[in-house]
Amino acid sequence: MKRKWLAVGIILLFVGVAIVPSINASNSEISLDDELVVVVQTNKKNYQVGKPVEVSIYVENHGGTNITLVFPSFQLADFQVNNCYLWSHEKVFIPMTTQWTIPSGKRVFLLNDSWEQVDFSGTQVLPGTYTIIGWMVESYNSSMISAAPVSLRIGSEMTIEAHGGFGVTITLTNVGLFNATDVKGNVSIKGGLFNFINLSESFDTDNFIVNESISKKVYPFGFGPINIEIIASASNAEELTLEGRLSIILFLVYPITPPYKIIEVKQ
């Protein structure tokens, strides 16, 4: 009898050992959408043509306990731009189990990279409006979780120029594809004999239409070298900064170094 029960015990032991791994190896998906929130963000909303778009994707734990996710590779997230670009395209990820714990009430960044405004073939995309869709990839214990899409515009661009002559003429031009809004600028001219010249002028407009120009005329009076600094900004375009060194005789202003158009900066 003892031998019989010993045999039964050994059989049950083997059955138990066989059952446990099958339970632990279960990859059934569970939905954590209510607790985990994935967010995709860019560093700006408006970009000049050819400027990198910085993209970040992070996950926030809105639940009351820490959540541990186990991914099948080093890839944690992905994003797509319209139908022209996919971040993971032609990338190779090491098939090694990766474990991440998201503490309750905290966020963990899954991806930080840039889109160079190119399509699948590496060609610069055309100016226009683009939508980025990002997501956390599927893990062993969670399905894929998508983030709310974000939109951006490529083509916001302004130029700034300064000309000498009778006074100084400053010209700001909208050469982009969209109207610039809340445009503000400041002109500072300093120097001359005994630093006698110290002028400051400003200009602004609420709506800067495409191909429109804004001009400002400043009339410094004096003798000797002067420095000019111009700063212009808009709510949907990058800040412009122009600096130049000129010479003045009474009201006549000339750049110390040709050409007579001091400088042109495109941002």
Image: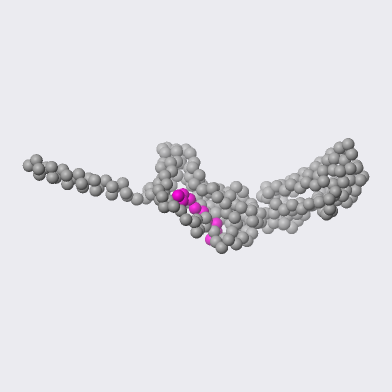
Residue reaching furthest to the right:
250
Name the spot of residue 118 as percent of width and height, x first.
Answer: 59, 59
* Of the pair 179 and 60, the residue shown nearer to us: 60
Residue at the location (88% across, 36% down)?
Answer: 194
Verify whether residue 4 appears in magenta.
no
Residue at the location (49% across, 46% down)?
Answer: 110
Residue at the location (10% across, 44% down)?
Answer: 4
Residue at the location (44% across, 38% down)?
Answer: 104
Q: How is the image coloured?
A: one colour
Q: Where 104 sits versus 129, above or below?
A: above
Magenta-highlighted residues: 74-83
Image quadrant holding the N terminus, namely top left
Verify whether residue 79 appears in magenta.
yes
Name the spot of residue 119 as percent of width and height, x first.
Answer: 57, 60
Q: Residue 128's quadrant in the figure?
A: bottom right
* Of the pair 123 and 160, the residue shown nearer to us: 123
Side of 167 where 139 appears, left or right:
left
Any part of residue 35 in sight = no
Name the spot of residue 13 as percent of width and height, x first.
Answer: 20, 44
Side of 234 where 164 appears, left or right:
right
Any part of residue 245 in sight = yes
Q: Residue 188's quadrant in the figure?
A: top right
Side of 238 where 9 appears, left or right:
left
